[in-house]
Amino acid sequence: MVGVNFGRGSSYDGTLNELALLVESAGDVPVAKITANRQAPDAALFVGSGKADEIKALVVMHQAQAVIFDQALSPAQQRNLERHLEVEVLDRIGLILEIFADRARSHEGKLQVELARLEYLATRLVRRWSHLERQRGGVGLRGGPGETQIELDRRMIETKIKSVKERLVKVKKQRNTQRRSRERAGTFRISLVGYTNAGKSTLFNALTKAGAYTANQLFATLDTTTRQVFLAETQTSVALSDTVGFIRDLPHSLVASFEATLQEATEANVLLHVIDAGSQAQHDQINEVMRVLASIGAADLPQVLVFNKCDCLSADQQPSVQRDIYELPCGRACVRVFVSALTGEGMDVLRGVIAEAVLGGLGLDSSTNPELDPRFDMHNPIDVDVPRSVHPDFFTVRT
Ligand SMILES: Nc1nc2c(ncn2[C@@H]2O[C@H](COP(=O)(O)OP(=O)(O)OP(=O)(O)O)[C@@H](O)[C@H]2O)c(=O)[nH]1
Ligand SMILES: [Mg+2]
C-alpha cells in the first residue's frame, strides 16, 4: 500500500489504515505500507523513481501480488507502474469498485455498480476489461484477456451506460411505487446514513431485530433495506432504512450511480447520522458525510447525530451525558445521542429521540439539554495522535 502526501489541500492519511481496511474488505491481505512526500505527482510513475525502486524491493521481499495507491492514478501512471513493479497496480477508487462489484446483491445494486464502473472506465479509459468482467476474487493474480483485446471503445461504453441507465429507471419506478405506498400509509421515514463501518447496520439490527449483514469491512452494505419498527413511545410504526456507507474521495460519478439507493435517504423525514465515536478520523468523516448529503440534496433534512461505539472509548473519554446538542460545521445544531449498538447502551435514549422526531419536534432548546460535552465538540476536538508527517521508513503490517 502506497500513500503520497502532496501537502496541504490534498487528502492524505499517513497511517493508511483506511486503505488497509479497504484491502481487507476486498479479500486481500495487506503486507506492507510505504509513504512518500512530493510536491506534485510524477507524470510517469506518480512517485519518484527512487521511491518506485523502494516499492519494488518491498514487492519482492513480501512476494506481493499487487500494489495499491491511496491516491488516484492516471491510466498511464498505472501502466508505467505495472511495468516497473511487475505486479498489478490499482488505485483506491479501482479497489472500491472491486469491493462494490463483489458486494452488490440486489438487481438494483448490481446495476448501480455496473453503472459506476462504466462511468469510471469512460472517464479514465482503463485499459483492461478484466476489471469489468471479474465478478469475484481478490486483488491478486488475475488472468483475463490480454491487452490487445481490452482496448476500450468509448462508444461501446456509452451504449452500455445508456442501457444500464434505462434498466435502472425501471427499477426505480418499482421502488417509487413501494415508497408511495409507504407515503400513503403516512409512515414516518428514517434513514441511517454515515461513513462506512460506523455501525449503521448494527444499529439497524439493534432497532429492528433484523438480521442485516454487518462486518468489520468497508461497504458491507450496498443495498438499501427497509423495515418497520414499532415505537412503544408513539404507538406507531416507523420505516427505518439502512443505506450504503460513504467514504472520502468518492468520485461524484460513483455517488451519482447510487442515486437510486440514496434516494431513500433524500426522502426521509429524519436522518440518523451514525458516527464512529472511537475513530480518530471522526471529524473528517462527519465532513465527508455532510458533503455527500449536500450532493444528493439531503443536507437540510433534520439530523440526529448518533455517536456509536461508545463502548470502545476509554473511561476518561466516556461522554458525561447521554444526549446533548452538537453544532455541525455548517453551524446547524443537532441532537446528539451517545450509544453502543453492540452493547445496547443508550439505545433507549435514541428511541426516545426518534419518538420526539415522530411527534414533530426534536427539542433543540438548550434548556432541556445539558451542556455540550467539550470532548466531542467540533471546535474542540479530542486531542488525538494522528501522525500527519510521513513515516521515514516503510513498516511491515503483517507478513
Ligand atoms: N465495539 C463496537 N463495535 C461496533 C458497534 N457497532 C458496530 N460495531 C462493529 O463495527 C463494524 C461495522 O459495523 P456495521 O454495522 O457493518 O457498519 P456499517 O456502518 O453498516 O458499515 P458499511 O455497511 O460497511 O458501510 C462491525 O464489526 C460491528 O460489529 C458498537 O457499538 N461497538
Ligand atoms: Mg452496513
Image (cartoon, rainbow, N blue to C red):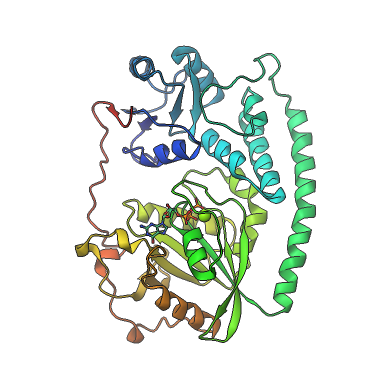
Which of 314 and 127 lies nearest the eye of the viewer?
314
Residue 153 rendering spot, x and y as whole percentages: 74, 24
Spot occupied by residue 252 in the image (x, y as percentages of width and height):
58, 45
Instruction: Answer with left or right where residue 314 lies relative to residue 264.
Output: left
Residue 234 placement: quadrant:
bottom right
Instruction: Tell me the residue at 74%/78% (across/down).
Output: 184
Residue at 57% from the left image edge and 38% from the top image edge? 97
* Quadrant (top left/top right/bottom left/bottom right) for the N terminus: top left
**Quadrant position of residue 329:** bottom left
Q: Position of residue 275 (x, y in %)?
A: 41, 60
Whether residue 13 appears in this view of the structure is yes
* 198 displayed left or right of 395: right
- Can residue 378 be seen in this snapshot? no
Q: How many marks?
A: 0
Residue situated in front as seen by the camera: 316 or 155:
316
**Residue ranking furthest to the left:** 316
Nearest the eye: 9 or 127:
127
Percent x, y of residue 346: 37, 73
Residue at 47% across / 51% down in the picture? 196
Q: In which quadrant will I find the C terminus?
A: top left
| 343 in relation to 164, above or below | below
Looking at the image, residue 40 lies above or below residue 351: above
* Image point (37%, 39%), residue name: 12
